[in-house]
């Protein structure tokens, strides 16, 4: 079974860089896509993008293209979400979730616990 | 991108009530529609995939239906643990967009 464990909460200042992680401790990392989902305070779920760790094929949602970088290291079963210059509007909870390799017609079946990112001066 | 809408945005109901809420896609998505439940401070949980297929462990009082552009999630007898926010999500075309959610409150 997939078990996704995310890195801990962080507080950053505007303009700083950040890389958060999502590690699969339970199953074969390369049999799933990994998605990153943003939830801003009091708001709904937004898919940022997905990555297939087997070959690092990455698809970004248009709103997030160029704003973040999604990557993965299959040797340590870890996916990453990275910012080069944070803004206050990046304050949110970020979830990783697994998506079966077929991708279409299926849902995000396992979720990490979420990473709270707070960006404040 | 395919846009997803949900109605109502919130509803108040009592334990034992039958509740139904809807999700609409901006274009046909066949049955490629998933439903999630999220409780405060918790990660979302996948309830139903392919419009009507209950995930393992999800109680049978929940059911989903629909195809094309219109979908419904029904809870036949609302239980205390069902008070949460419910999101639909299409998995027909990337990016796999979510609806804005329906929050179920205790009346």
Image (tube, helix red, strand yellow):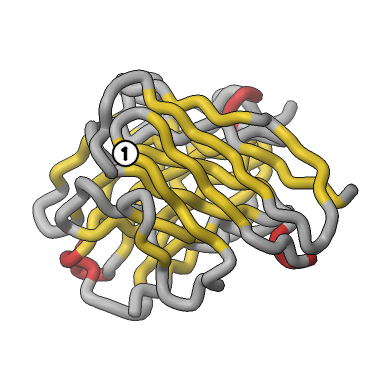
Residue visible at 82% across and 42% down?
A: B12
Residue visible at 68% across and 30% down?
A: B9
- Quarter of the image that includes the N terminus of chain B: top left
* Chain at numbered mark 1: B
**Residue lying farthest to the right in this orientation:** B107
Asked if A61 appears above or below A98 in the picture, the reply is above
Mark 1, other Cα within 10 Å: few <14 / some 14–19 / many ≥20: some
| Res. A102 visible in picture | yes
| Residue topped by disc 1 | B67
Asked if A77 appears above or below A65 in the picture, the reply is below
Is residue B20 shown left or right of residue A83? right
* Percent of width and height locating residue A7: 52, 60
Residue visible at 24% across and 48% down?
A: A105
**Residue lying farthest to the left in this orientation:** A55
Q: Residue A109 occupies which quadrant of the picture?
A: bottom left
Is residue B37 shown left or right of residue B99? right
Is residue A51 shown left or right of residue A83? left
| Disc 1 secondary structure class | strand
Residue visible at 41% across and 60% down?
A: A22
* Percent of width and height locating residue A43: 65, 33
Which is nearer the eye, A60 or B37?
A: B37
* Percent of width and height locating residue A54: 12, 59
Which is nearer the eye, B16 or A16?
A: B16
């Amino acid at each position: 079974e997939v078990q996704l464990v995310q890195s801990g909460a962080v507080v950053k200042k505007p303009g700083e860089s950040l890389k958060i992680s999502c590690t699969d401790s339970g199953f074969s990392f390369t049999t799933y896509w990994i998605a990153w989902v943003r939830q801003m305070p009091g708001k709904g779920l937004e898919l940022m993008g997905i990555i297939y760790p087997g070959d690092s094929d990455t698809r970004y949602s248009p709103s997030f293209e160029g704003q973040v970088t999604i990557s993965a290291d299959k040797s340590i079963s870890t996916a990453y979400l990275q910012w080069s210059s944070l803004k206050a509007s990046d304050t949110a909870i970020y979830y990783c979730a697994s998506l079966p390799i077929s991708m279409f017609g299926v849902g995000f079946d396992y979720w990490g616990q979420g990473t709270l990112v707070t960006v404040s001066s | 991108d395919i846009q997803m809408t949900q109605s109502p945005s919130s509803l108040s109901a009592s334990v034992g009530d039958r509740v139904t809420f809807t999700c609409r896609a901006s274009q046909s998505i066949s049955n490629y529609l998933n439903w999630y439940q999220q409780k405060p401070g918790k990660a979302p949980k996948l309830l139903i995939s392919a419009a009507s297929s209950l995930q393992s462990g999800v109680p049978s009082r929940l059911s989903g239906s629909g195809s094309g552009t219109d979908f419904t999630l029904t809870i036949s007898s609302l239980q205390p643990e069902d008070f949460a926010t419910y999101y639909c999500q299409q998995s027909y075309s990337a990016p796999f967009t979510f609806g804005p959610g329906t929050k179920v409150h205790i009346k």
